[in-house]
């Protein structure tokens, strides 16, 4: 008789690394997808377009180990959302008092993209990249032709990602035995991310699923609103930090995600300070972005906190490449707003979990009726 494996203490799960599961292939795809558009805009002499190119290339991050046809459809839907986010970001950037428009429209966008993520079963799930794209672009002053340029550049980068994502279908490779077993045991159109599978099981269709999506918008609005009211320089980082832990449905998983976010961001900021102190620009900055993107994809599904060691400087180098900013300001804002957004996320997660738990208990009690009397032992 087999014995149950005891659950790890919570603090130990922070340091657990999952299996490699072919992450190197995903990392290579992501690296190629980002380097081609970035080098192109650099060669054209418009490195300020790099933000549009980078966000379009993020379509390559979807459908990590999903079969080709399903990966293409997933990446296509994500590409449409990302390009839409970039274009909408340019529109918001041109609005008067755009800081508050970023919060309001970003929060609504977070809810909409969360719904689309569930509909198209994105892997990774959630509205993170869509919110990041919209809010980051909206924070950069637009030029006279920015709308058309943003659409063309982000669309071109997304097309490159789709082509790179499909290239594996014509290359004969020998898959590892564990990946073949995992693929055969899972329906081809099922979400391969464990968080997405848990969400599919825990959330029924209908109102509660919509409520799950709405809490992304609530958290983004609260975090962004507080950050803007306090006058912190980059409120969208608080919004991003607020949506990340909510991808998990269980409160314990949200807490783990939040811990990874705080610890990984702090360590990543140390690395970012070192890298940005060299004031990279042009091809050097592009090389850094590509290297950090590859490193992040190697670890993001194995240990999210460790991946943030690379994701954090990646985001800062991307922003600095397109719109140079004081390094100290970037680092301080990122640290403060990550902490703010994470606290908001945990409060929203705790509140919604308490409400759903109370409703589930009430529903269970009504369905079972009064408990029968039990004899004394």
Image: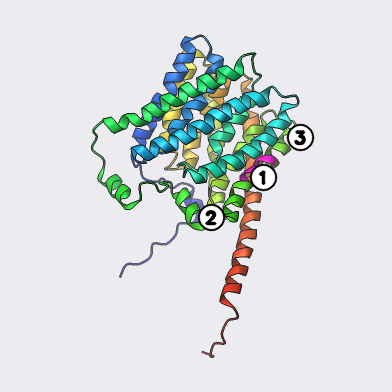
Q: Position of residue 368 (x, y in %)?
A: 56, 76
* Residue to which mark 1 is pinned: 218
Q: Residue at the location (59% across, 50% down)? A: 210
* Residue to which mark 3 is pinned: 229
Residue 208 against residue 151 in the figure, above or below: below
* Front one among 231 and 362: 362
Q: Residue at the location (36% across, 38% down)? A: 69
Q: Position of residue 223 (x, y in %)?
A: 68, 40
Is residue 323 visible to us here? Answer: no
Cα–Cα gap, marks 3 and 2: 36 Å
Cα–Cα gap, marks 1 and 2: 20 Å
Q: Residue at the location (76% across, 35% down)? A: 229
The magenta-colored residue range is 216-221
Cα–Cα gap, marks 3 and 1: 16 Å
Whether label 3 touches label 2, CB < 8 Å:
no
* Residue to which mark 2 is pinned: 205
Residue 104 against residue 91 in the figure, above or below: below
Q: Residues within 10 Å of mark 2 (few under 14, many from 20)?
A: few
Q: Nearer the viewer, mark 3 or mark 1?
A: 1
Image position of 231 (left or right of 166): right
Indicate the secondary structure of the residue bearing disc 3: helix
Q: Position of residue 106 (x, y in %)?
A: 64, 35
Does the magenta portion include 220?
yes
Does the magenta portion include 185?
no
Q: Residues within 10 Å of mark 3 (few under 14, many from 20)?
A: few
Instruction: Identify the main secondary structure in magenta.
Output: helix
Q: Residue at the location (39% across, 32% down)? A: 27
Nearer-N-terminus badge (1/2): 2
Residue 9 against residue 163 in the figure, above or below: below
- Badge count: 3
């Amino acid at each position: 008789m087999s014995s149950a494996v005891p659950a790890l203490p919570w603090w130990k799960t922070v340091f657990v690394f999952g299996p490699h599961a072919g992450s190197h292939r995903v990392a290579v795809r992501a690296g190629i997808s980002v380097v081609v558009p970035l080098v192109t805009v650099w060669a054209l002499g418009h490195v300020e377009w790099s933000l549009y190119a980078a966000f379009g290339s993020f379509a390559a991050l979807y459908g990590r180990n999903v079969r080709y046809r399903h990966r293409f459809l997933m990446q296509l839907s994500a590409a449409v959302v990302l390009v839409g986010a970039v274009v909408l970001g340019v529109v918001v950037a041109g609005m008067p008092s755009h800081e508050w428009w970023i919060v309001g429209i970003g929060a609504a966008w977070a809810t909409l993209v969360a719904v689309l993520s569930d509909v198209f079963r994105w892997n990774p799930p959630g509205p993170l990249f869509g919110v990041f794209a919209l809010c980051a672009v909206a924070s950069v002053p637009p030029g006279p032709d920015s709308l058309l340029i943003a659409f063309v550049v982000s669309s071109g980068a997304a097309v490159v990602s789709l082509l790179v994502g499909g290239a594996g279908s014509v290359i004969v490779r020998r898959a590892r035995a564990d990946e073949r077993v995992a693929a055969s045991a899972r329906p081809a159109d099922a979400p391969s991310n464990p968080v997405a599978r848990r969400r599919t099981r825990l959330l029924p269709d209908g109102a509660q699923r919509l409520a799950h999506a709405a809490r992304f918008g609530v958290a983004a609005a609260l975090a962004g609103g507080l950050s803007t009211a306090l006058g912190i320089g980059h409120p969208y980082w608080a919004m991003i930090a607020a949506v990340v832990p909510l991808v998990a449905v269980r409160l314990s998983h949200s807490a783990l995600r939040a811990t990874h976010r705080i610890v990984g961001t702090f360590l990543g900021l140390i690395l970012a300070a070192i890298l940005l102190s060299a004031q990279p620009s042009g091809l050097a900055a592009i090389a850094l972005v590509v290297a950090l993107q590859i490193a992040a994809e190697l670890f993001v599904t194995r240990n999210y906190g460790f991946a943030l060691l690379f994701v954090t400087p990646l985001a800062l180098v991307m922003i600095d490449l397109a719109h140079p900013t004081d390094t100290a300001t970037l680092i301080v804002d990122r640290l403060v707003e990550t902490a703010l957004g994470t606290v908001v996320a945990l409060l929203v997660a705790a509140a919604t979990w308490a409400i759903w738990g109370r409703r589930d208990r009430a529903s269970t009690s009504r369905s079972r009726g009064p408990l029968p009397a039990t004899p004394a032992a």
